[in-house]
Amino acid sequence: MSCCGFSCVVYTLGVILGLVLLKKVVGFIYAHFIYKNSTNYRGKNVLITGATSGIGEGFAHEFSRRGANVIVVARNEEKGQNLKNTLETKYKNQVSIAIVDFEKASREEIKQALLNVVGNNKVDVLVNNVGINNTNNSPFPFTEQPESDFDKLIKVNLHSVLSVTRAIMPIMNERGTILNLSSYTAQYPTPLMTVYAATKSFINAFSLALKYEAPKMEVYGLSPMWVKSDMTMVRRATLMKPEATVYARSCVDIIGCPFGVSYGLTSAYWPHDLVVSLLALVPESFLMKQMKGFLSGLMKKMQKKAEEKKQ
């Protein structure tokens, strides 16, 4: 190949890569700083699992703020009632409660509990938020993790999503929205969080397949990083670790975005999306080494605290 021919190939590749990068940058700016979901949710029905704390509670407040009728799915009836009272007092909307313990309930029990509350109404938005982490929210080497975690993680993180979606999707508005809460750990192999991360990878794959199976619906796999909640043990909100209500608002704002949201898989919150995009440029082997080091340090720190409490 002549020098001129080689230069032309390099130039062409450079232009293509530049256009791809430009598309990503423009898409990021449009999705997070220009586009805003203008859907009127007043009077629409929104069903949220795991709604009494963390991100689920954030969604309950955000959709209530926008005038929606919210169906709170909770394990604890007292917490569900407290949230119902708070939402109805603050936003003057209609709130219903369905009590489900996803760790114990069968698929049929889940279906009946939800349909008894939904009644003859159509559901416009389904938020599959309920989820749990490892025992004590701690990292574990796979061979040392309590085996009881396996069944719990599968029941709450996977079985719940399949059961709730199967029960509710047939009675949803044909142009409804499904938001499935995943995690940034779904996008990478995550040593010491092996089973938890694998359950979240399932959520992404399920969301993506469902999106193409039901093209009239908006289906998203949402992959937050750290958000202030009991599960993440984040006690103080920052730009990178937002309040649950801030994160939920970002998620609702991005619904329907026609450009800049890759196949419906997104962190939704711009600082998280930015970090995830930058991490994609880092060699996976290096990233996994750093991830393992961080989680190993966290595990030792948590073990030390647990031992100190025993003394």
Image: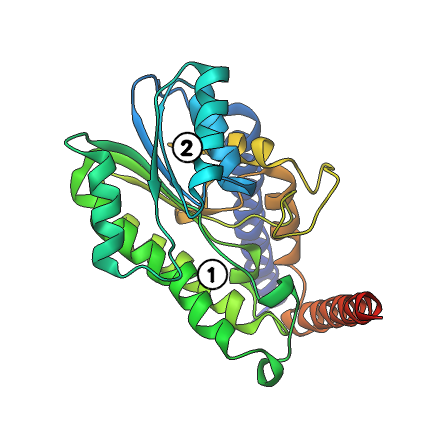
Mark 1 sits on what residue?
200
* Residue 118 x, y percent position in the rendering: 23, 35
Q: Residue at x 42, y 41 (%)?
A: 77
Residue 10, image x, y percentages = 60, 60
Residue nearer the viewer, 17 or 244: 244
**Position of 292 relative to 240 (above/below):** below
- Does the CB distance between marks 2 and 1 fall below 8 Å? no
Q: Quadrant of the N terminus?
A: bottom right
Q: Is residue 125 positioned above or below 99 on the image?
A: above
Q: What is the quadrant of residue 22 in the picture?
A: top right
* Residue at disc 1, secondary structure: helix
Q: Residues within 10 Å of mark 1 (few under 14, many from 20)?
A: many
Residue at the far top in the pictured view: 92
Q: Which mark is residue 257?
A: 2
Q: Earlier in the sequence, mark 2 or mark 1?
A: 1
- Left or right: 110 as drawn, with respect to 19: left
What amino acid is labelled 2 in the image?
A: Cys
Asked if one can make out residue 100 in the rendered structure from this viewpoint, the answer is yes
Residue appearing at x 34%, y 54% in the figure: 161
Which-is-in-front pick, marks 2 and 1?
1
Front-most of residues 17 and 145: 145
Q: Is residue 257 left or right of residue 237?
A: left
- The picture quadrant where one finds residue 309 is bottom right
Describe the colour scheme in one phrase.
rainbow
Task: Return the mark for residue 46.
Answer: none
Q: Which secondary structure, mark 2?
A: loop
Q: Position of residue 283 (x, y in %)?
A: 66, 68
